[in-house]
Amino acid sequence: MYSDSFVEARPDHQFLRRFSLLEGIAGGVFPTAQPVLNPAGAPYLMPGGRQYTTDQARGAVYSLLLQVAGGALHPGQFLAQRPSPSSGTSPEEDLWEEVGAWVKIRNTVAHEGTAQRAGGNSVSAARQSFEASLSQYGPAGGTWTTGFAALASALRSATESTIYAVIAGRV
């Protein structure tokens, strides 16, 4: 599946394949729902107040990458470039935010068939929010497309690290 991602001509479809691979591996590592906790030991909560578990894509991929890192992330590990500091106070919290951005991209590509903006002049509020969330990644003054490129590069690195960890039996 990873090698198939390189055959995809469109970067957003490559992204979807790579994220799906991480989700699939996580499903094998976490066959039952486990709570996803922040570095202080408190649960990460969804907007409705429910606790994230490894049953959700965000919780599963985040937990998988923590295992790949051996439980201790290095600053910047698996993370896209950001022009300004994130709101996270630790590498783990930064990763949590970033996996959330990956999920937004995955959902957009899976449901709309592309991460590219549709033709026409009107842009929905949801699309504006999506683009704004991606523009915080990549070089300063970047756009959602440069943010997407930075996130895609980080996802590729995380996917490769995960594959190596699986082969080495560390996951």
Image (spheres, rainbow, N blue to C red):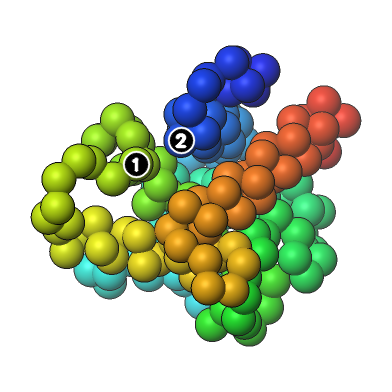
Is the C-beta separation of discs 2 and 1 under 8 Å?
yes
- Front residue of 92/98: it is 98
| Residue visible at 43% across and 58% down in the picture | 144
Which of the numbered marks, if any, corresponds to residue 12? 2
| Residue visible at 52% across and 66% down in the picture | 142
Q: Secondary structure at mark 2?
A: helix
Q: Residues within 10 Å of mark 1 (few under 14, many from 20)?
A: few
98 relative to 158, above or below: below
78 relative to 81, above or below: above
170 relative to 72, above or below: above
The quadrant of the image that shows the C terminus is top right
Counting residues from the start of the chain, the first of labels 2 and 1 encountered is 2
Which residue type carries mark 1? Gln
Asked if residue 150 lies left or right of residue 136, the reply is right
- Front residue of 38/86: it is 86
Which residue type carries mark 2? Asp
Q: Which residue is mark 1?
A: 116
Q: Residue 117, position in %: x, y?
A: 28, 45
- Front residue of 121/164: it is 121
| Residue visible at 62% across and 82% down in the picture | 85
Q: How many marks?
A: 2
Asked if residue 104 lies left or right of residue 83, the reply is left
Q: Residue 100, position in %: x, y?
A: 45, 58
| Residue visible at 74% across and 31% down in the picture | 163
Of marks 2 and 1, the one in the foreground: 1
Asked if residue 42 lies left or right of residue 109, the reply is right
The quadrant of the image that shows the N terminus is top right
Which of the numbered marks, if any, corresponds to residue 49? none
Q: Residues within 10 Å of mark 2 (few under 14, many from 20)?
A: many
Residue 37 in sight:
no
Q: Residue 47, position in %: x, y?
A: 27, 69
Q: Residue 17, position in %: x, y?
A: 51, 27
